[in-house]
Image (cartoon, helix red, strand yellow):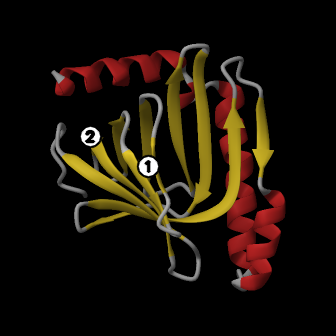
């Protein structure tokens, strides 16, 4: 239970397995909040990296965070269609007005035609050794890559463009 009312602003904070802060998104508007998920949206929000570098997102994004899945999904509305960026991550926790999760490096990039590519397997391999990921964690993460690929192929949940469009329309009602 997050207790966040739609329309409120929260932060998103990603960490690495060793507890180090990885990245912070300053302002995300809550669109839906239940005990199992948060759907949020942002546009032109400040993002700060662990090295202090910051940048501003370029397009609207609808973000899906789960308490029962080891991934999160960001649908980015670009001129050529909806692109998705999926982080293999721990389930989120909500504390101190922020969605918090551990980023486990593996990502899936999904293009508007729903083709996709698994990214950062080399980075995952390095961090798995450096941070001593237990084998049970490795299995959970690999299983969730498969689960996420199934969602993509089935156009399940966020991978339905209509779902992204509907949440974006809701986001616009909070921006006026």
Query: Who's the residue at 69% across and 84% down the image?
Result: 131
56 or 155, nearer to the observer = 56
Residue 30's x, y, as percent?
26, 41
Residue at disc 1, secondary structure: strand
Taking the image as shown, residue 91 lies to the left or right of residue 137, namely left
**Residue 157 in sight from this viewpoint:** no
Placement of 121 over or under 75, stated as above or below: below
Q: Disc 1 and disc 2: Cα gap in Å? A: 13 Å
- Residue 25: percent from the left, percent from the top? 39, 52
Residue 165 lies, with reference to residue 143, above or below; the image says above
Residues marked 1 and 2 touching at CB (< 8 Å) = no
Sequence-earlier tag: 1 or 2: 2
Residue depicted at 20% across the width and 26% down the height: 175
Q: Residue at x 51, y 78 (%)?
A: 20
Q: Looking at the rendering, which quadrant does residue 63 occupy?
A: top left
| Residue at the image position 53 percent from the left and 42 percent from the top | 73
Q: Is residue 128 left or right of residue 53?
A: right
Q: Which residue is mark 2?
A: 29
Give coordinates of residue 121: x percent, y percent: 81, 58
Q: Residues within 10 Å of mark 1 (few under 14, many from 20)?
A: many
Could you tell me which quadrant the N terminus lies in? Answer: bottom left
50 to 83, vertically: above or below: below
Which label belongs to residue 90?
none
Point out which mark residue 65 bears: 1
Horizontal side of 142 relative to 46 (left or right) equals: right
Q: Circle 2 sits in a helix, a strand or a loop, which is it?
A: strand
Q: Nearer the viewer, residue 133 or 22?
A: 22
State the image quarter where residue 79 is shown: top right
Task: Locate residue 45, reporting x and y percent.
Answer: 36, 42
């Amino acid at each position: 239970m997050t207790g966040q009312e739609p329309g409120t602003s929260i932060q998103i904070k990603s960490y690495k397995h060793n507890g180090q802060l990885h990245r912070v998104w300053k302002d995300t508007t809550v669109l839906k909040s239940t005990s199992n998920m948060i759907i949020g949206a942002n546009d032109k929000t400040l993002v700060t990296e662990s090295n202090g570098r910051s940048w501003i997102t370029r397009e609207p994004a609808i973000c899906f965070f789960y308490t029962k899945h080891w991934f999160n999904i960001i649908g980015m509305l670009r001129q050529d269609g909806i692109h998705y960026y999926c982080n293999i991550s721990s389930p989120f926790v909500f504390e101190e007005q922020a969605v918090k999760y551990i980023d486990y490096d593996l990502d899936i990039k999904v293009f508007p035609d729903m083709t996709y590519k698994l990214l950062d397997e080399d980075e995952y391999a390095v961090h798995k050794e450096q941070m001593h990921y237990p084998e049970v964690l490795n299995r959970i993460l690999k299983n969730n890559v498969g689960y996420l690929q199934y969602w993509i192929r089935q156009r399940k949940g966020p991978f339905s463009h209509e779902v992204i469009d509907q949440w974006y329309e809701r986001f616009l009602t909070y921006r006026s």
